[in-house]
Structures are given as structure tokens and as C-alpha cells.
Image (cartoon, rainbow, N blue to C red):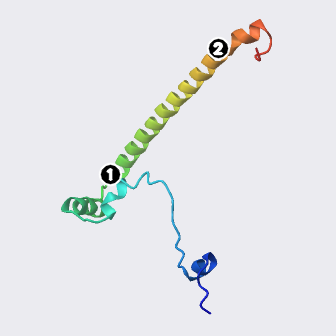
Amino acid sequence: MGRYHGKYSFDQLSHLRSCLIKKLKMEGVNDMRYPPHTPKKLGWARFFILKTFDLGWVGRMLLLALLAVVAAVLLQHNHHDATWSFSSHLSSIAPCLNECGDCGS
């Protein structure tokens, strides 16, 4: 009894706590969740909780069509960039293939 002087005794008698390590990318958006709760934060919270928009059937279809157009434009833009970078890369290695037969030199 009375030999509580080493590392293992310290670990045995300590209360270990867990620690969460993560990137806080979107926590700025959730700023209204944390104190201090100012009138501006409470106003935004009331807006998101109490306000509902009834677009109706036509409004939902228009919103869906708008999202489809945005997605198509983004996909077309990404496809165009990928095609351009591949063709430029291909043209940069083509002279090497024509001259020596292998790209090692």
C-alpha cells in the first residue's frame, strides 16, 4: 500500500477523456447554435424554423428544372476542361513518340 508513484499508477488513477479531432469546415454556418445568442441570431433561427415557402406544384417543377440546368452546365464545363487537359497532354508527348519510339528519353 502507498506505492502510487509510477506512470502506471498515475494512468490507473487518472480519468481518461476522449478527444474528437476533425476539420470544422461548415461550423461557420452553424454559428447561430452557439452562445451568445444575440437578437440577430435569434431572428435568423426564427426565420429558419417558422418560415415555410409554399411554391406549389409549378414552383417545385421550375426549381427542379433550374437545378437540372445548373447541373448540366457544370457537367459540360467539367467535361470540357477534362477533354482539353487530356488533349494538351497528349499533344505534348506525341513528338517524343514520333521521334524516338519510347518516352523514356
Residue at 47%, 31% (x, y): give it.
73
Numbered disc in front, either 1 or 2: 2
Image coords of residue 5 (percent x, y): 59, 81
Q: Which residue is mark 1?
A: 55
Residue at 52%, 33% (x, y): give it.
75
**Position above or below: 76 against 99:** below
Q: Which residue is mark 2?
A: 92
Which corner quadrant holds the N terminus? bottom right
Q: Nearer the viewer, residue 81 or 28?
A: 28
**Position above or below: 97 against 84:** above
User: Where on the picture, by quarter, is residue 24?
Assistant: bottom left
Residue at 44%, 51% (x, y): give it.
25
Image coords of residue 38 (percent x, y): 21, 63
Which corner quadrant holds the C terminus? top right
Q: Nearer the viewer, residue 59 or 83?
A: 83
Real-space Cα distance between discs 1 and 2? 53 Å
The local crowd at label 2, few if under 14, some if 14 to 19, many if 20 or more residues have their Cα within 10 Å, is few
Query: Position of 7 compared to 75: left or right?
Result: right
